[in-house]
Image (cartoon, rainbow, N blue to C red):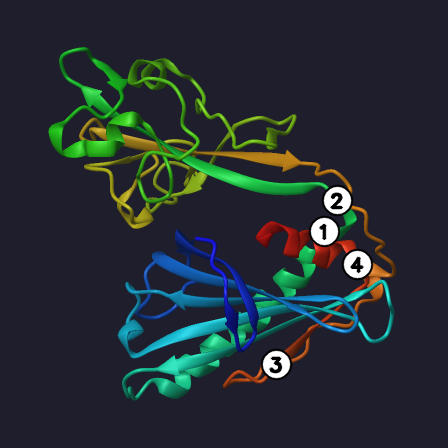
Amino acid sequence: TKQEGSVEEGRLCWSRDIHAVATLPPKPLCPKTTPVCFSNDIFVTQTARGKSVCINTLVQTPALPFSDCYNVVERVKLTPSPMCSDSATVSKSFRIQWHKHTWLKSTIEAQTLQMEMEASKCVLATFQQRACGARQERVEEIWELQRWSLTEHRWCSPFLPHDGDKSWRWLDSSYERHPWLRGSYADCEEAEQPPILPASGWEIDENGWVPTPQRTSDEGASGSGDTEWQYALDFYSSDKLYFDHNPGVFPCRRRLWRATFVRIPEAPDVLVQDVEKVPPVEAVLLRGRPCRAGLLRAGKALTQRLSGLCS
Protein backbone atom coordinates (compact mmCIF):
# COMPACT_ATOMS: atom_id res chain seq x y z
CA THR A 1 0.00 0.00 0.00
CA LYS A 2 1.35 3.40 -0.90
CA GLN A 3 1.43 5.92 1.92
CA GLU A 4 2.49 9.51 2.34
CA GLY A 5 3.64 11.49 5.34
CA SER A 6 6.73 12.52 7.24
CA VAL A 7 8.25 10.15 9.75
CA GLU A 8 11.52 10.02 11.63
CA GLU A 9 13.43 8.18 8.92
CA GLY A 10 11.99 10.24 6.07
CA ARG A 11 8.95 10.09 3.86
CA LEU A 12 7.20 6.75 3.98
CA CYS A 13 6.59 5.81 0.38
CA TRP A 14 5.63 2.15 0.34
CA SER A 15 4.54 -0.63 2.68
CA ARG A 16 4.36 -4.26 1.69
CA ASP A 17 3.74 -7.56 3.50
CA ILE A 18 5.31 -10.72 2.10
CA HIS A 19 4.36 -14.21 3.26
CA ALA A 20 6.75 -17.03 2.41
CA VAL A 21 7.98 -20.45 3.47
CA ALA A 22 11.66 -20.46 4.42
CA THR A 23 14.01 -23.44 4.49
CA LEU A 24 15.87 -23.72 7.79
CA PRO A 25 19.30 -25.21 8.47
CA PRO A 26 19.35 -28.25 10.76
CA LYS A 27 18.94 -26.97 14.31
CA PRO A 28 17.69 -28.57 17.54
CA LEU A 29 13.95 -28.06 18.13
CA CYS A 30 13.54 -26.51 14.66
CA PRO A 31 11.55 -27.86 11.67
CA LYS A 32 12.93 -28.05 8.11
CA THR A 33 10.71 -25.21 6.88
CA THR A 34 8.72 -22.47 8.55
CA PRO A 35 6.27 -19.77 7.44
CA VAL A 36 7.74 -16.27 7.57
CA CYS A 37 6.06 -12.86 7.36
CA PHE A 38 8.09 -9.86 6.19
CA SER A 39 6.53 -6.44 6.83
CA ASN A 40 8.49 -3.93 4.75
CA ASP A 41 8.47 -0.13 4.99
CA ILE A 42 10.44 1.86 2.41
CA PHE A 43 11.57 5.41 3.17
CA VAL A 44 13.17 7.98 0.89
CA THR A 45 15.09 10.94 2.32
CA GLN A 46 16.61 13.81 0.37
CA THR A 47 20.16 14.57 1.45
CA ALA A 48 22.77 17.07 0.28
CA ARG A 49 24.41 14.40 -1.91
CA GLY A 50 21.18 12.91 -3.24
CA LYS A 51 18.42 10.56 -2.25
CA SER A 52 18.83 8.02 0.54
CA VAL A 53 16.69 4.87 0.55
CA CYS A 54 15.94 2.97 3.76
CA ILE A 55 14.10 -0.36 3.94
CA ASN A 56 12.86 -1.44 7.38
CA THR A 57 11.66 -5.03 7.69
CA LEU A 58 9.85 -6.67 10.58
CA VAL A 59 10.51 -10.42 10.42
CA GLN A 60 8.02 -12.74 12.15
CA THR A 61 8.34 -16.54 12.38
CA PRO A 62 5.24 -17.65 14.29
CA ALA A 63 5.88 -21.40 13.93
CA LEU A 64 9.35 -21.46 15.49
CA PRO A 65 9.89 -22.29 19.18
CA PHE A 66 9.91 -19.20 21.44
CA SER A 67 8.90 -17.00 18.49
CA ASP A 68 6.26 -15.37 20.69
CA CYS A 69 9.07 -13.94 22.82
CA TYR A 70 10.71 -11.76 20.17
CA ASN A 71 10.72 -10.26 16.68
CA VAL A 72 13.63 -9.31 14.47
CA VAL A 73 13.76 -5.87 12.84
CA GLU A 74 16.17 -5.43 9.92
CA ARG A 75 17.28 -2.29 8.14
CA VAL A 76 18.96 -1.97 4.74
CA LYS A 77 20.09 1.54 3.84
CA LEU A 78 21.48 2.96 0.61
CA THR A 79 23.13 6.35 0.97
CA PRO A 80 25.26 8.45 -1.38
CA SER A 81 28.88 7.60 -0.66
CA PRO A 82 31.09 10.35 0.79
CA MET A 83 34.10 8.67 -0.89
CA CYS A 84 32.87 8.98 -4.47
CA SER A 85 30.20 11.13 -6.05
CA ASP A 86 28.90 8.35 -8.30
CA SER A 87 28.77 5.62 -5.65
CA ALA A 88 26.33 4.38 -3.04
CA THR A 89 27.05 2.80 0.33
CA VAL A 90 24.95 -0.20 1.35
CA SER A 91 24.61 -0.96 5.06
CA LYS A 92 22.60 -3.55 6.95
CA SER A 93 21.70 -3.59 10.63
CA PHE A 94 19.21 -5.31 12.87
CA ARG A 95 17.83 -5.47 16.38
CA ILE A 96 15.77 -7.91 18.40
CA GLN A 97 12.49 -6.80 19.95
CA TRP A 98 11.87 -8.82 23.12
CA HIS A 99 8.29 -9.29 24.29
CA LYS A 100 8.82 -11.99 26.92
CA HIS A 101 11.70 -13.27 28.99
CA THR A 102 13.15 -16.64 28.06
CA TRP A 103 16.11 -18.59 29.41
CA LEU A 104 17.27 -19.10 25.81
CA LYS A 105 17.73 -15.38 25.21
CA SER A 106 21.52 -15.54 24.83
CA THR A 107 21.26 -18.55 22.49
CA ILE A 108 18.66 -16.82 20.31
CA GLU A 109 20.79 -13.69 20.12
CA ALA A 110 23.88 -15.69 19.11
CA GLN A 111 22.01 -17.63 16.40
CA THR A 112 20.35 -14.47 15.11
CA LEU A 113 23.73 -12.77 14.91
CA GLN A 114 25.11 -15.63 12.82
CA MET A 115 22.13 -15.61 10.44
CA GLU A 116 22.28 -11.85 10.03
CA MET A 117 25.96 -11.96 9.13
CA GLU A 118 25.21 -14.49 6.39
CA ALA A 119 22.26 -12.39 5.22
CA SER A 120 24.50 -9.31 4.98
CA LYS A 121 26.74 -11.09 2.49
CA CYS A 122 23.71 -12.05 0.39
CA VAL A 123 22.38 -8.50 0.43
CA LEU A 124 25.65 -7.05 -0.82
CA ALA A 125 26.03 -9.75 -3.49
CA THR A 126 22.47 -9.10 -4.70
CA PHE A 127 23.02 -5.37 -5.07
CA GLN A 128 26.28 -5.93 -6.92
CA GLN A 129 24.64 -8.43 -9.27
CA ARG A 130 21.71 -6.16 -10.04
CA ALA A 131 23.95 -3.14 -10.55
CA CYS A 132 26.10 -5.08 -13.03
CA GLY A 133 23.10 -6.36 -14.95
CA ALA A 134 24.55 -9.85 -14.50
CA ARG A 135 22.75 -13.08 -15.26
CA GLN A 136 20.51 -14.15 -12.39
CA GLU A 137 19.81 -17.77 -11.55
CA ARG A 138 17.35 -19.58 -9.34
CA VAL A 139 16.93 -23.31 -8.81
CA GLU A 140 13.37 -24.61 -8.61
CA GLU A 141 12.51 -27.95 -7.01
CA ILE A 142 9.26 -29.81 -7.61
CA TRP A 143 8.07 -33.06 -6.07
CA GLU A 144 6.21 -35.48 -8.31
CA LEU A 145 3.77 -37.63 -6.32
CA GLN A 146 2.02 -40.78 -7.52
CA ARG A 147 -0.28 -43.36 -5.96
CA TRP A 148 -0.82 -46.94 -7.11
CA SER A 149 -4.28 -47.64 -8.50
CA LEU A 150 -5.57 -51.14 -7.78
CA THR A 151 -8.30 -50.80 -10.40
CA GLU A 152 -6.11 -49.51 -13.23
CA HIS A 153 -2.95 -51.37 -12.17
CA ARG A 154 -0.69 -48.40 -12.74
CA TRP A 155 0.83 -45.39 -11.01
CA CYS A 156 -1.26 -42.25 -11.32
CA SER A 157 -1.80 -38.92 -9.63
CA PRO A 158 -2.97 -39.08 -5.99
CA PHE A 159 -6.72 -39.60 -6.05
CA LEU A 160 -7.91 -40.29 -2.50
CA PRO A 161 -10.16 -37.68 -0.82
CA HIS A 162 -7.61 -36.82 1.87
CA ASP A 163 -4.86 -36.17 -0.71
CA GLY A 164 -6.11 -32.62 -1.29
CA ASP A 165 -3.59 -30.54 -3.27
CA LYS A 166 -1.45 -33.64 -3.71
CA SER A 167 -3.85 -34.71 -6.47
CA TRP A 168 -2.18 -32.08 -8.70
CA ARG A 169 0.90 -34.35 -8.72
CA TRP A 170 3.46 -31.52 -9.16
CA LEU A 171 4.04 -29.86 -5.80
CA ASP A 172 6.45 -27.63 -3.91
CA SER A 173 8.45 -28.63 -0.83
CA SER A 174 5.37 -28.21 1.39
CA TYR A 175 3.29 -30.56 -0.81
CA GLU A 176 1.19 -27.68 -2.02
CA ARG A 177 0.40 -26.83 -5.61
CA HIS A 178 3.41 -25.09 -7.12
CA PRO A 179 2.71 -21.40 -7.88
CA TRP A 180 4.16 -21.76 -11.41
CA LEU A 181 1.99 -24.76 -12.23
CA ARG A 182 -0.13 -24.20 -15.33
CA GLY A 183 -2.78 -26.23 -17.12
CA SER A 184 -5.75 -28.31 -16.08
CA TYR A 185 -5.81 -31.33 -13.82
CA ALA A 186 -5.80 -33.56 -16.91
CA ASP A 187 -2.71 -31.76 -18.23
CA CYS A 188 -0.90 -32.39 -14.96
CA GLU A 189 -1.94 -36.05 -15.04
CA GLU A 190 -0.55 -36.60 -18.53
CA ALA A 191 2.63 -34.52 -18.22
CA GLU A 192 5.89 -36.44 -18.14
CA GLN A 193 7.82 -33.42 -16.84
CA PRO A 194 6.71 -30.57 -14.57
CA PRO A 195 4.20 -28.45 -16.56
CA ILE A 196 5.65 -25.19 -15.31
CA LEU A 197 5.24 -21.70 -16.76
CA PRO A 198 7.84 -19.49 -15.04
CA ALA A 199 7.25 -15.95 -13.93
CA SER A 200 7.76 -13.16 -16.42
CA GLY A 201 11.39 -12.68 -17.41
CA TRP A 202 12.60 -16.13 -16.35
CA GLU A 203 13.61 -18.90 -18.75
CA ILE A 204 14.68 -22.46 -18.09
CA ASP A 205 18.30 -23.21 -18.97
CA GLU A 206 19.48 -25.71 -21.57
CA ASN A 207 19.49 -28.65 -19.13
CA GLY A 208 15.74 -28.46 -18.52
CA TRP A 209 14.05 -30.47 -15.80
CA VAL A 210 16.17 -33.26 -14.34
CA PRO A 211 15.01 -35.92 -11.83
CA THR A 212 17.35 -35.87 -8.85
CA PRO A 213 18.41 -39.05 -7.02
CA GLN A 214 17.67 -38.92 -3.32
CA ARG A 215 19.28 -40.64 -0.35
CA THR A 216 16.79 -42.99 1.32
CA SER A 217 16.62 -44.73 4.68
CA ASP A 218 17.40 -48.21 3.34
CA GLU A 219 20.94 -47.52 2.12
CA GLY A 220 22.65 -50.81 1.54
CA ALA A 221 19.43 -52.79 1.25
CA SER A 222 19.32 -52.59 -2.53
CA GLY A 223 22.50 -50.91 -3.63
CA SER A 224 23.76 -47.43 -2.92
CA GLY A 225 20.52 -46.01 -1.57
CA ASP A 226 20.43 -43.34 -4.31
CA THR A 227 17.33 -43.51 -6.49
CA GLU A 228 14.96 -41.24 -8.35
CA TRP A 229 11.80 -42.76 -6.89
CA GLN A 230 11.16 -43.09 -3.18
CA TYR A 231 8.43 -45.38 -1.81
CA ALA A 232 6.36 -45.14 1.36
CA LEU A 233 3.00 -46.00 2.92
CA ASP A 234 1.85 -42.39 2.52
CA PHE A 235 3.16 -39.03 1.36
CA TYR A 236 5.32 -38.12 4.31
CA SER A 237 7.50 -35.04 4.67
CA SER A 238 10.26 -36.90 6.53
CA ASP A 239 12.91 -38.52 4.31
CA LYS A 240 13.45 -41.26 6.88
CA LEU A 241 10.10 -42.86 6.06
CA TYR A 242 10.93 -43.52 2.40
CA PHE A 243 12.68 -46.50 0.76
CA ASP A 244 14.43 -46.85 -2.58
CA HIS A 245 12.69 -50.08 -3.58
CA ASN A 246 9.11 -51.31 -3.42
CA PRO A 247 8.48 -54.90 -2.25
CA GLY A 248 4.84 -54.51 -3.30
CA VAL A 249 3.43 -53.05 -0.09
CA PHE A 250 4.04 -49.32 -0.62
CA PRO A 251 1.18 -47.56 -2.48
CA CYS A 252 2.89 -44.15 -2.68
CA ARG A 253 6.00 -42.86 -4.37
CA ARG A 254 7.68 -39.54 -5.05
CA ARG A 255 10.67 -38.11 -6.89
CA LEU A 256 12.34 -34.71 -6.93
CA TRP A 257 12.80 -32.64 -10.09
CA ARG A 258 15.22 -29.74 -10.35
CA ALA A 259 15.70 -27.04 -12.96
CA THR A 260 17.71 -23.85 -13.17
CA PHE A 261 15.94 -20.73 -14.39
CA VAL A 262 17.88 -17.73 -15.63
CA ARG A 263 17.13 -14.10 -16.21
CA ILE A 264 19.43 -11.61 -17.87
CA PRO A 265 18.11 -8.18 -16.92
CA GLU A 266 18.72 -5.06 -18.92
CA ALA A 267 21.95 -3.47 -17.81
CA PRO A 268 21.12 -0.43 -15.64
CA ASP A 269 22.74 2.90 -16.23
CA VAL A 270 25.19 2.53 -13.37
CA LEU A 271 28.93 2.25 -13.05
CA VAL A 272 30.34 -0.71 -11.15
CA GLN A 273 34.05 -0.82 -10.43
CA ASP A 274 36.35 -3.12 -8.47
CA VAL A 275 33.55 -5.47 -7.45
CA GLU A 276 36.08 -8.06 -6.29
CA LYS A 277 37.75 -5.47 -4.04
CA VAL A 278 34.63 -4.60 -2.07
CA PRO A 279 35.48 -4.77 1.65
CA PRO A 280 34.17 -7.90 3.38
CA VAL A 281 31.17 -7.84 5.66
CA GLU A 282 32.05 -6.83 9.16
CA ALA A 283 30.37 -8.15 12.30
CA VAL A 284 26.70 -7.40 12.71
CA LEU A 285 26.14 -6.01 16.18
CA LEU A 286 23.12 -6.65 18.32
CA ARG A 287 20.63 -4.06 19.48
CA GLY A 288 20.45 -2.20 16.20
CA ARG A 289 23.97 -0.84 15.91
CA PRO A 290 24.80 -0.68 12.21
CA CYS A 291 26.95 -3.17 10.38
CA ARG A 292 28.85 -2.08 7.31
CA ALA A 293 27.90 -4.39 4.48
CA GLY A 294 30.51 -2.97 2.14
CA LEU A 295 30.78 -0.23 -0.46
CA LEU A 296 28.89 -0.78 -3.68
CA ARG A 297 30.51 1.25 -6.42
CA ALA A 298 27.43 2.01 -8.42
CA GLY A 299 26.16 5.17 -10.01
CA LYS A 300 23.48 7.48 -8.78
CA ALA A 301 20.97 5.64 -10.92
CA LEU A 302 20.95 2.80 -8.36
CA THR A 303 19.26 4.85 -5.66
CA GLN A 304 17.23 6.68 -8.27
CA ARG A 305 15.81 3.39 -9.54
CA LEU A 306 14.91 2.28 -6.02
CA SER A 307 13.31 5.58 -5.16
CA GLY A 308 11.52 5.51 -8.50
CA LEU A 309 9.71 2.36 -7.38
CA CYS A 310 8.11 4.41 -4.66
CA SER A 311 7.11 7.41 -6.76
Q: Who's the residue at 44% across and 22% down the image? A: 195
Residue 134's disc is 2
Contact between marks 2 and 1 (CB within 8 A): the answer is yes
- Name the residue that disc number 1 marks: 129
Q: Who's the residue at 50% across and 66% down the image? A: 5
- Name the residue that disc number 3 marks: 290
The amino acid beneath tag 3 is Pro
Classed neighbour count for the residue bearing mark 2: other residues with Cα under 10 Å, few (<14), some (14–19), many (≥20)? some
Q: Earlier in the sequence, mark 4 or mark 2?
A: 2
Instruction: State the separation of the CA atoms marked 3 and 1.
Output: 23 Å
Location of residue 118 in the rendering, given as x and y in whole percent from the top left corner: 58, 68
Q: Earlier in the sequence, mark 3 or mark 1?
A: 1
Instruction: State the separation of the CA atoms marked 2 and 1.
Output: 5 Å
Q: Which of these two is toward me, 20 or 266?
A: 266
The amino acid beneath tag 1 is Gln
- Name the residue that disc number 4 marks: 300
The amino acid beneath tag 2 is Ala
